[in-house]
C-alpha cells in the first residue's frame, strides 16, 4: 500500500514539475535572445554613460568611472541643448503631420468608391520603401540645381531668381524639408491603423446619425473621434518613439546640417560615438533619450488609465 502511495505521489510530483517547468522551457530560448539583444546592451550602455570611455587607439581602451560628470557636461553643452530642442520640434511637426494627413486619408479610403482596394495598396508604398532609398529620392527632389521641386515651382511661375537650396539653408527651411520627408514616410502606417479603427465603428451609428440629419463634422466629432481615441493614443505613442529616435533618413539627407539646423539627438549620439570616439559621452546622450521615452510612455499609461 505504501509503495503504491509513493509511486502515485512520485507521478503527481513529476506531472506537477512538467506542468510548471515545461512552459518556461519553451520560452527560455526567447528569454536568452532578449537578454543578449536587449537587456545586456541596455545595461552596458547605462554603465558606459557613467564612464569616460574613448575609442581613440592612442588613448586607454578601458572605461574610467566618472560618475555623473557626463550628464553634468551635457547640461553645459550648447550643441546638446540645441539638438534637444530641434529633436522636440522635429517630433512634434512630423507626428502631428502624420496624424492629420493619415486621418484625412483614412476617412477618404473608408468611403465607398471604385478602385478603393488599389488605392489602399498604393498608400503603403512610402512605408515599405527602404529609408535609404527614400532619403536619396528626397535629396534628388530637393537638389538646388536639378531638383524636381525647383523645376516644378519655376514652371508654375512660383519661383523667380535663383533656385532654392532646400537642404542647404541654415534657417528653418532645411528642418521643414526633412520634416516633409519624415511625414511622407510615416503617413501610410498612420493611415492603415486609423482606417482599421474606422472600420471597427458599428455601421448602426452612421445610420442613426444620417437619420438624425447630422452633418459630416458632427459625425467626426461625436462618433469617429471618440471611437478612435484609444487607437489614436497607441499610434501616436509609437510614432512619437520612432520619430524621436529617427536617425537614418535625416542623417543621409543632411548629416545634421547645415549649421545644426537638423541636428537631432540621435545624430549627435552617433557623431560623438564614432567621429569623436567619445563612447561614454555618447552613452550619456542615449541615456537622456531613454529617460525621455520612459517619460512619454509613463504619460501615455497615466492618460489611458485615467480614461478607464
Image (tube, grey):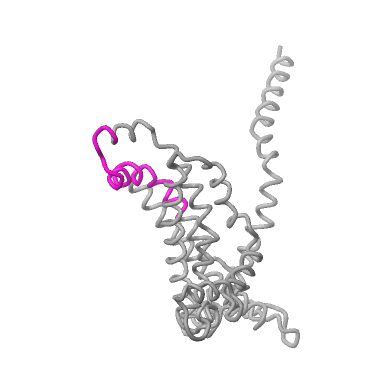
In x, y percent, where is residue 252? Answer: 63, 73
Front one among 202 and 210: 210
Position of residue 230 in the picture relative to residue 254 (left or right)? left
> For the N terminus, which image quadrant?
top right
Count up the numbered dots: 0
- The residue at the point 32 percent across, 32 percent down is 207
- The residue at the point 72 percent across, 86 percent down is 59
In x, y percent, where is residue 144? Answer: 57, 80
In x, y percent, where is residue 179? Answer: 49, 69
Q: Does 18 lie within the magenta span?
A: no
The residues colored magenta run 210-236
Q: In this view, does 256 lie above or below 120?
A: below
Does the magenta stretch mainly form a helix, a strand or a loop? helix
Front one among 156 and 150: 156
Q: Is residue 307 above or below residue 129?
A: above
Q: Is residue 305 above or below residue 254?
A: above
Asked if one can make out residue 221 in the rendered structure from this viewpoint, the answer is yes
Q: Does 229 lie within the magenta span?
A: yes
Position of residue 68 in the picture relative to residue 37 (left or right)? left
- The residue furthest left is 212
- The residue at the point 35 percent across, 30 percent down is 204
> For the C terminus, which image quadrant?
top left
In x, y percent, where is residue 27? Answer: 67, 42
- The residue at the point 67 percent across, 27 percent down is 13
Asked which quadrant contains residue 149, the reply is bottom right
- The residue furthest bottom is 58
Amino acid at each position: 500500500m505504501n509503495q503504491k502511495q509513493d509511486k502515485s505521489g512520485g507521478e503527481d510530483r513529476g506531472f506537477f514539475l512538467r506542468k510548471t517547468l515545461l512552459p518556461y522551457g519553451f520560452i527560455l530560448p526567447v528569454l536568452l535572445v532578449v537578454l543578449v539583444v536587449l537587456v545586456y546592451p541596455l545595461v552596458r550602455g547605462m554603465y558606459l554613460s557613467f564612464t569616460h570611455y574613448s575609442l581613440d587607439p592612442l588613448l586607454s581602451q578601458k572605461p574610467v568611472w566618472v560618475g555623473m560628470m557626463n550628464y553634468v557636461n551635457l547640461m553645459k553643452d550648447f550643441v546638446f541643448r540645441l539638438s534637444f530642442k530641434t529633436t522636440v520640434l522635429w517630433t512634434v511637426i512630423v507626428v502631428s503631420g502624420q496624424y492629420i494627413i493619415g486621418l484625412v486619408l483614412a476617412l477618404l479610403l473608408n468611403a465607398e468608391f471604385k478602385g478603393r482596394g488599389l488605392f489602399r495598396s498604393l498608400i503603403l508604398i512610402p512605408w515599405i520603401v527602404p529609408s535609404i532609398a527614400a532619403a536619396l529620392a528626397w535629396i534628388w527632389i530637393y537638389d538646388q540645381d536639378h531638383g524636381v521641386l525647383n523645376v516644378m515651382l519655376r514652371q508654375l511661375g512660383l519661383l523667380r531668381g535663383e533656385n532654392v537650396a532646400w537642404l542647404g539653408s541654415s534657417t528653418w527651411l532645411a528642418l521643414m524639408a526633412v520634416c516633409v520627408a519624415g511625414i511622407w514616410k510615416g503617413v501610410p502606417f498612420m493611415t492603415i491603423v486609423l482606417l482599421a479603427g474606422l472600420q471597427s465603428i458599428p455601421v448602426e451609428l452612421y445610420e442613426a446619425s444620417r437619420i438624425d440629419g447630422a452633418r459630416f463634422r458632427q459625425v467626426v466629432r461625436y462618433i469617429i473621434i471618440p471611437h478612435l481615441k484609444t487607437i489614436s493614443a497607441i499610434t501616436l505613442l509609437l510614432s512619437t518613439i520612432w520619430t524621436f529616435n529617427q536617425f537614418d533618413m535625416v542623417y543621409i539627407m543632411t548629416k545634421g546640417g547645415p549649421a545644426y539646423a537638423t541636428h537631432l539627438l540621435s545624430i549627435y549620439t552617433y557623431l560623438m560615438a564614432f567621429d569623436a570616439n567619445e563612447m561614454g559621452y555618447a552613452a550619456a546622450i542615449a541615456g537622456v533619450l531613454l529617460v525621455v521615452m520612459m517619460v512619454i510612455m509613463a504619460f501615455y499609461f497615466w492618460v489611458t488609465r485615467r480614461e478607464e
